[in-house]
Image: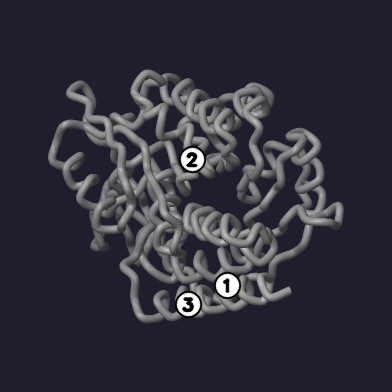
Amino acid sequence: MNGLWVVGDFAWDVLIRTNAPLQTGGDTYGEVNLAPGGSAANAAVWARRCGMDTTFVGKVGSDRLGDLAAEDLQAEGVSACLLHSDAQATGSVAVWIDHAGERSMVSGKGADHYLLPSELPRDQLAQARHLHLSGWSFFANPPRSAAREAARIAKQGGATLSFDPASFQLIGNVGVDRFLSYVTDLGVDLIFPNYEEGAALSGETEPERIVPALAERMPGTRVILKLDAKGARVQDGPVGGVPIEPVPSRLVDATGAGDAFAGAFLAAWLRSRDAVEAARFAARVSAWVIERLGARPKVDAALHALLEEWHVSASRAAGLEEES
């Protein structure tokens, strides 16, 4: 079967970072950058950076930013099936990063919101080993119907399926029960909520209670709860989940850290099927991300060393398994 497939949003992030609070009606200096993003595309890129053969399916405009999206994915080594729209522009998101490193976003409705079921590469999706979907495709139609159809095709072909809820605010707007009704019948194998999303979906506030409560609401789904500076918690054995220790880091920009976690986790989990070790690796990758600006900072020596160390360790573990 073909490797990891990701269906969903590609958007360009307009990153605005200030060193002081904004002044209403006033002016201030800061950094303004354009960077590739989109939750689904970010996860695809991070899985590829971590060594997983990855294909991204999404929709962009017939414009220069759409051309740049194709160039970006090609440069990252991600195979791309990009549909082009003459009616909508390529998606964009305004991301304001405050002086403490926390981010607020305003998402425009670009071409990524108009992917249709009829535009999916059905034959190829049926050969996928794993499909990953983002909640951003589920808050409105038509992307929701396209994402659900992609899940149906992939699962029918024998693929496993993962899902990132994406936004607790928009889950609240849609309604928890209604939102869950869009995903609980898909056969989701893995779900990656952050704390706020997990609390909203489960009705619980303590991480050790969120994990089993959400697992009960989504039978057959393994919960990987992302807890930012507190690490993570993985549903594996103990009822409340296995705690994953946080990796010490200095917060510069939280944009895309959850997507990086999901992409890195999938690259590791699809190789070993060890959810706890995959989460530990993903925590290290996301810690590297938050110390830099943007969802997909350029690979540097520190990240290269981290990935190389993991590949060596994973190869050694696989060799020991074969010997035993």
Asked if residue 66 lies left or right of residue 176, the reply is left
Residue flagged by tag 2: what amino acid is it? Ala
Cβ atoms under marks 3 and 1 closer than 8 Å: no
Residue position for label 2 = 128
Could you say where residue 165 lies in the image, as x and y percent from the top left? 57, 39
Report whether residue 27 is seen.
no
Asked if residue 213 lies left or right of residue 20, the reply is right
In the image, farthest residue toward the left: 64
Asked if residue 301 lies left or right of residue 284, the reply is left
Few, some or many C-alpha atoms within 10 Å of disc 1 (few <14, some 14-19, many ≥20)? some
Q: Nearer the viewer, residue 293 or 300?
A: 300
Which colouring convention does the figure follow?
one colour
Q: CA distance from mark 3 to mark 1?
A: 12 Å
- Quick check: 119 above or below 53? above
Identify the residue at horizontal 63%, vertical 68% (top origin): 280
Residue position for label 1 = 314
Cβ atoms under marks 2 and 1 closer than 8 Å: no
Residue flagged by tag 3: what amino acid is it? Leu
Q: Nearer the viewer, mark 3 or mark 1?
A: 1
Q: Quadrant of the C terminus?
A: bottom right
Identify the residue at horizontal 48%, vertical 20% (top origin): 145
Q: CA distance from mark 2 to mark 1?
A: 23 Å
**Which numbered disc covers residue 306?**
3
Few, some or many C-alpha atoms within 10 Å of disc 2 (few <14, some 14-19, many ≥20)? many
Looking at the image, is mark 3 or mark 1 earlier in the sequence? 3
Could you say where residue 200 lies in the image, as x and y percent from the top left? 68, 38
| Callout 3 secondary element | helix
Residue flagged by tag 1: what amino acid is it? Ala
Looking at the image, is mark 3 or mark 2 earlier in the sequence? 2
